[in-house]
Image (tube, rainbow, N blue to C red):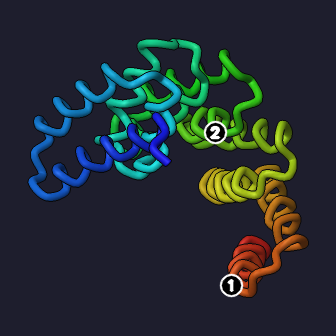
Amino acid sequence: MNTPRSRALSQLASIVDKYRQHGDLSQLLEALAAFAGETPTEELFAAADAYAGIPEVLGPLMEVVVDREPGHARALVRLANAYWLAGRGPDVVGDLASRALAADPSHRGAWHLWALTETDPRGRMQRWLQVTQRFPDDELARANLADNAASVGTTEDDPVALKLALDTFAGLRSTASHPRQVEALDQAITALRNR
């Protein structure tokens, strides 16, 4: 079936294939700009999903979506992620994450990027704590909270942060099902208890 979305994905696949063959970034950016200029936002967004792991593709496409729709939370998060993967730094990425949160306070990815971009270790721990309070079943956020609390607790000799780390690791351990995950959590808990 030749739908607009499948046509857009096919066009983008051709652009990316040429880039992979020749590695010419300026040619890629020129082709992406032409493609984005003639592709409606939803089709552009859907096609870009297939290349979410390639920041040099995803970034320019999401820039177009954000230019068209500055409050498009999903596009802001995708752009922030592309920028993070490309090494754009916490200030730029944090600004995009904050804009996404303002547009959609329930967007979990925006919260993750917001927490990730805090440069102060204690501040980052506090941000991850906020994310886990907002999304109690988010295991990735809980793991990040535990890691950051363990770091703060050990580097600053902070018993409150250490307790937070231990409690969070223990909570993750109680729901872990994969043997490697259980083993890693047991090692983290033992290391913190023996500190």
Q: Position of residue 71 (x, y in %)?
A: 58, 14
Q: Position of residue 51 (x, y in %)?
A: 40, 49
Relative horizontal placement of residue 158, taking residue 7 as reference (left or right):
right
Residue at disc 2, secondary structure: helix
Q: Which residue is mark 2?
A: 109
Q: Position of residue 167 (x, y in %)?
A: 87, 61
Q: In the figure, 35 relative to 145: above or below?
A: above
Relative horizontal placement of residue 82, taking residue 129 as reference (left or right):
left
Q: 15 or 186, which lies in front?
A: 15
Residue visible at 31% across and 20% down? 37
Relative horizontal placement of residue 2, taking residue 133 as reference (left or right):
left
Q: State whether residue 188 appears in this view.
A: yes
Residue at disc 1, secondary structure: helix
Q: 164 or 40, which lies in front?
A: 40
Q: In the figure, 40 relative to 185: above or below?
A: above
Relative horizontal placement of residue 74, taking residue 27 as reference (left or right):
right
Residue visible at 45% across and 43% down? 2
Which dot marks residue 180?
A: 1
Q: State whether residue 80 appears in this view.
A: no
Residue visible at 32% across and 30% down? 60
Q: Position of residue 177 (x, y in %)?
A: 82, 79
N-terminal of the pair, mark 1 or mark 2, is 2
Amino acid under disc 1: Arg
Residue visible at 57% across and 41% down? 116
